[in-house]
Image (spheres, rainbow, N blue to C red):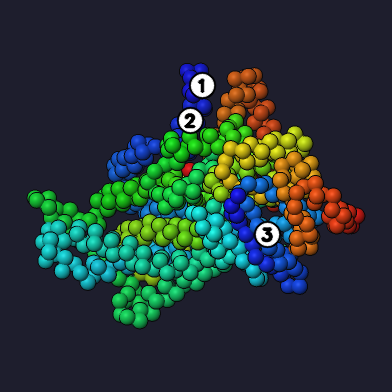
Amino acid sequence: MTTVLRTEELRKQFGDLVATDDVSLEFDDQHVTSIIGPNGAGKTTFYNLLTGVLQPTSGEIWLRKDGDMTEITDAEPHEVARSGLSRSYQITNIFEGLTVRENLQVARIAHEGRTFDMRSRPDADEELNEEIDDLMELTNLTEIAETKCDTLSHGEKRNVEIALALAIEPSVFLLDEPTAGMNPTETEEIVSLIRELNRDIDATFIVTEHDMGVVTDISDRIVVLAEGAVLADGEPEAVLSDERVTEAYLGSETV
Amino acid sequence: MSTQNDGLVDRIGNVGRQAIGNGWTTERFALLGLLALVVVSVGPQFQVYLFTEFLIIALFAVAFNLLYGYTGLLSFGHAMFFGAGAYGLAIVLRDYQSAIAEIVGTGLAPLATFVVGGIAGVALALLIAIPVGYLSVRLEEIYFALITLAFGMLFYSLLLQDPYGLTNGSDGIFVALGGVELGGTEFRLAGRRIYYYITATVVTISIYGIWRIVNSPFGTICKALRESPDRAAALGINVSVHRWMTFIVSALFVSIAGVLIAGFSSVATPNEAHWSMSATPVVATVIGGASYFGGPIVGAFLYHYVRWGISRFPALEAYWELFFGIMLIVVVLYFKQGAAGGLAMVGAWLRNVQAAYDRGGANAATAFVRESIGEKLGSMMSRSTTGRSDDGGTDR
Ligand SMILES: Nc1ncnc2c1ncn2[C@@H]1O[C@H](COP(=O)(O)OP(=O)(O)OP(=O)(O)O)[C@@H](O)[C@H]1O
Ligand SMILES: [Mg+2]
């Protein structure tokens, strides 16, 4: 068991609002961790800090890169991604005007460091497209490969969302509410996809999720955030039977 | 795809789509270039002249659109690079022609000077684009447009005020291309037909180069930046560096158009770098359709020839800007994808008319025409009050 990601007293304030309250967490390569918490608990903010989108007010972030823990607290988003930390978005953020295949070409070109290649042609690049075909197979996108994303259904877009993050072969994969807005069938598909990925690829999964069925289904460990701070952290049964956790949820749901 | 049973309209549509639409191949580019060369070179002298200027504006607009339509950055200062190209050529011609003649001999000197001047123009644009791009790409949308506009005005006033005695102020620099003597033959570079051949060749190669770039991995990343810069960053793309590179590449191709315009009009003046010149590719691109590779070319054609058409009626000439105003308003309100998008729409509509005809003869076709026009008018009316239209559109 190796630590792959660690935060130390990570803090983010928006004015007086403490969105991330001195969060110190460690993630290892053996467990799927779910981060849960009521709306506004600071889950997305935590991801934004990890991925360099937001600068922390204080604290540190460390990521395992080429075998060593490296500080990435001040790294820019593209540097974080190049270091092996990838994320999917709660609010779908894909290249809407491009086809599914083109979306994945973007990710693969970035991953292979060929962004300045002005001579070859992605459409004629067999190796590139074979990799993309495999990826689309895995994420159920094969049939819509040549469709422009702005005409896809919500569920299909969510698959593209995950495939994009996956395409850069991350060592740590942050999923931000992967099932947001999905119907039960689609949710079921995503859950089995995450299971499959966790089994087949060598990445550490961290998931935020509102759907408790999904959470209990996939996680080995649950971290509960409330008002930016870690309220509970441990094995699913223990955490979910914790009184303070039910209270935090009930408190928010009655509002 | 095409069978013998295809309707006539369908077949014409196919040819048209292949000519301006997606899937341009190297051969088609070469064919199109050759066609233009031949057709126009047999025309009257003045038409050759007019077409040459159109080609230069087309290159200007296509190079601009690499940054606008493909990368999502609206520059309002690209005349800066157009001017840089023009002045680079003009200064070399004025100051170094005799030095170059000493090296290559008087017979070849005009051609060699033209080439060296062209390279100097592109180099000057590069020198400007590196720092200007670096500072500008950190900003987005209106701020990007404004900072490029500001740099453009700065460059314009430097040309005009001429603090180092290089640019000859508002008069500009005379550009005399001279005659080449090669073996027994002799020709004037500035001769209308000769200059047309030069322009057609350079523009065709340049546009082909840009087409290769937008269809390369580099171009794929450009499109991603247009769609969602933060997602691109989350995939490991350095957004500002990529924008910067695109800015520079776009500027370099614009400066090639600038070199050509100086030779074309025999003078480099500050007008080439004036902010109103920066509007030219913007207007051409919007009219033609930014989301089509060929859009800016179609737009440049309309812009140039409508202007010429109007200029033939002295009574209307004073109002040509009014005509463009109206044209722009119509495009912005009803044809977001521009004339190229409009052509594609008309093509699709004609195919539907043909289909109706095949199904139910002339009556069905007229019924379809009446119905679809009524529908279109209806939706135009509601669109003009509810917002912009979006009639699809594609890349490449
Ligand atoms: N850029 C920002 N500026 C100001 N406040 C912000 C910003 N981003 C988030 N917040 C605030 O920080 C708090 C945490 O928000 P965050 O989006 O991280 O919650 P979350 O746990 O992801 O919620 P949800 O379950 O609804 O996705 C909220 O009160 C939110 O309003
Ligand atoms: Mg959230």
- Residue at 17 percent across and 53 percent down: it is B187
Q: Which mark is residue B6?
A: 1
> Upstream in the sequence, badge 1 or badge 2?
1
Q: Which mark is residue B59?
A: none
CA distance separating discs 1 and 2 = 10 Å
Callout 3: residue from which chain? A
Where residue A176 sits: x, y (%)?
69, 50
Callout 1: residue from which chain? B
Where residue B385 sits: x, y (%)?
73, 52
Residues indicated by labels 1 and 3 sit on the same polypeptide chain: no
Q: Which mark is residue B14?
A: 2
Q: Nearer the viewer, residue B232 or A240?
A: A240
Q: Which residue is mark 3?
A: A25
Tell me, yes or no, whether the two marked residues, 1 and 2, touch with CB atoms within 8 Å: yes
- Residue at 24 percent across and 62 percent down: it is B116
Nearer the camera: disc 1 or disc 3? 3
Residues indicated by labels 1 and 2 sit on the same polypeptide chain: yes
Residue type (three-letter) at the residue carrying disc 1: Asp
